[in-house]
Amino acid sequence: MNVTETQASTNGNAIHVDQVSRHYQMGGAIIRAVDHISLEVRAGEFLALLGASGSGKSTLLNLIAGLDRPTSGAIFAQGRDLAGMSSEDLARHRNRTIGIVFQSFQLLPRMTLEENVELPLRLAEIPRAERPGRVREALDRVGLAARVKHRPTELSGGEQQRAAIARALVNQPMILLADEPTGNLDSKTGDEIMHLIAGIHRPASGPGRTIIMVTHERALAEQYADRIVTLSDGAIAREERLR
Amino acid sequence: MKIGDLTELAARNLREAVLRNSLTTLGIAVGVASLVALLSLGVGLQQLVDRSVARAGLFDTISVRPRQSTPFGQRGGGRRDARDATNMEPPRVLDDAARKEIAALPNVVEVNPEVRFTAEARYEPNSQLVMVSGMPASSQGSGALDGLAGNFFSGPDAEEVIVQGDMAKRLLNEGQSLDSLLGKEITLRFAQRQALPPPSEQAASDAPNQAVGPDEEAMGFSIVPSEKKFRVVGVTPASDTGGGRVGFNNSGMYLPLAVAEKLQVVQGSDLREMSRSGTAEGVRYAALNVRASSPAAVAEIESSIAHMGFAAFSLIDVTRNLRTFFAIFDLFLAIFGSLALAVASLGIINTLVMAILERRREIGVLKALGAADRDVRQLFFAEAGVMGLAGGIFGVLLGWGIGRAIQFATAVYLKRQGMNSPNIWSVPLWLMLGAVAFAVVISLVSGIYPASRAAKLDPVEALRYE
């Protein structure tokens, strides 16, 4: 891709999904998990991907995250084509450009919160002396500064998800991907987490972040997202701009 | 990921499944221990033989004799070649000219005559027949006198004697220590050549002999009994305490070479040389001992001496074969020792494959957070390497202990059999470091498959794994 193409694909967008498909071979049948989807996400936008189970929203999120590669089409993140990246570059993309929050938190149970949050810094080869400050800052931001030495099993679901958010943000990525972040939480804790994510999207001070959140709860999406894209059978069924 | 972080994470992961990983590490340790124990015995035995041969001065010494002489009791007089059968010219005599010629050869350090004779040693009230040898000053630093009690000769002309331990025992009374002989005088009684006065005409017609020494030139000699006192300055260890052979000759007493030469003792070869030689003048030697600068130079010197027309003999070929034998012996020991390590490597593969299954989701999380395939591969390699390193170090210690135990048991057994107990066990630094390195390499090789498998895990699949 040349410079002009890069600029065109960026064009103020954090993410540009261009005619992306992800097909799986299951025996003789082809499963079209994502089928020719095109989508643009502006820098600083909060996009909710809505859909029923199996609609392809998580697959699309994994493709944007660089955890999976599309069968066809192109995905640009901050102007860089993920399809053209080596696995090393994709790993760097996951480490620096984006942060991921999972439904089931995915904290490593053998490590303390501090160590869990430090992991992306280790992978980014951040100097050892710099790490404790950044870990503290990230945990402080999600209100867990007092729990640094605790293991995930000693925390509630909400606390674990907040720790996962701290881990996703510790490398200061500009894009936060959240896959059903409240799916494993009760509604009150879910609200707290969504409030936290909204704060990350539009902080009281400093730059905001682009958020792409997968959810099946329309109410949640309507309350926090700038735009809702509804997927059905691997394709975009509806697009609504809320703000 | 940086190596410090990799090692830290690897150590943490290993601590989590401490029992399984400890057992795997123990398996490696047992493998390394068997390797170290067997090889240390092989090395120890080789060193024992090397020491014995080196003590006998055989690595760098060549015995030179006239062609008809019979070195080391061989029948037929040393080396012969096809030329000997057809060349009817009289063989070269081993005289001063030959000695100088040999000394001028490259890599020859010194050339000494072999002075060796039988004498009666008296240390009241005991007396013994003893083989006496002249010992050059160079023997002092050659290791030939390891374990010597007392001192080496104070000078080349000192009338001093070093007594071999077994001979000292025979001269001493029951219960006396070998050291008690130091400083005492021993009387040696021997057969001495004495030059005959200028021959009368009658004698000249009756005895057309040639003399052997400078004083006896063309005059012949008589043999008279003689005796001389020597002060004991050193006693070598007895054979039951690790001593035994000293130098090229297995003698009971040693005199400074120059002193031994001056004694003009009749040697076995004198009569033979006298009857064989018709025209020679000056000193004739029954044998010369040639010392080479290194064992590597022995073969070339030996060949040059043979071309000069003398019989040359060294044990270099024997020692070369000995080294080949020990190389093969050590190889077999290493193969047997490595079998346990090979089994241990299967343990590493098993442990790491189990770890992949258990930590599938963790691998997915690491990849989601930005770990490249290379990072995951290196992490598993680091875990295999840490197990190998720990197992290697522990194995070396274990092997060292096993070797010590074998040495101790052997010593006890040999002592009960009334034999001395030489050191048959040795763990040199190269063996320790090599064994640890080998354990790490084997562990890393064992880690290739699990590490590749972990690196290839699909992160999406891995994150779904419960």
Image (cartoon, coloured by chain):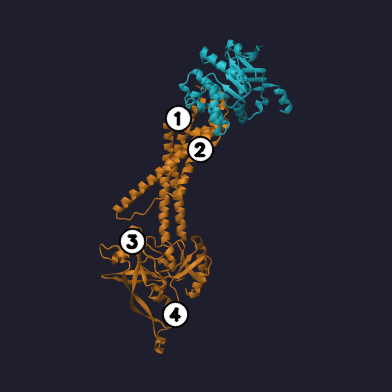
Chain colours: A cyan, B orange
Q: Which residue is mark 4?
A: B214
Q: Outermost residue toward the bottom?
A: B201
Q: For label 2, count other residues whose C-alpha is less than 10 Å away and answer few (under 14), some (14-19) or many (20+).
A: many
Residue type, mark 4 in image: Pro
The chain identifier of the residue carrying mark 1 reads: B
Q: Secondary structure at mark 4?
A: helix
Mark number for residue B444?
2
Q: Is residue B439 above or below residue A25?
A: below
Mark number for residue B238?
3
Q: Secondary structure at mark 2?
A: helix
Q: Are marks 4 and 3 in contact (CB under 8 Å)?
A: no
Q: Which residue occupies the foreground of this view, B302 or B165?
A: B165
Q: Is residue A196 above or below residue A132?
A: above
- Rendered-image quadrant of the N terminus of chain A: top right
Give the mark, 4 or 2, whose residue is nearer the N terminus: 4
Q: Which residue occupies the foreground of this view, B104 or B64?
A: B104
The chain identifier of the residue carrying mark 4 reads: B
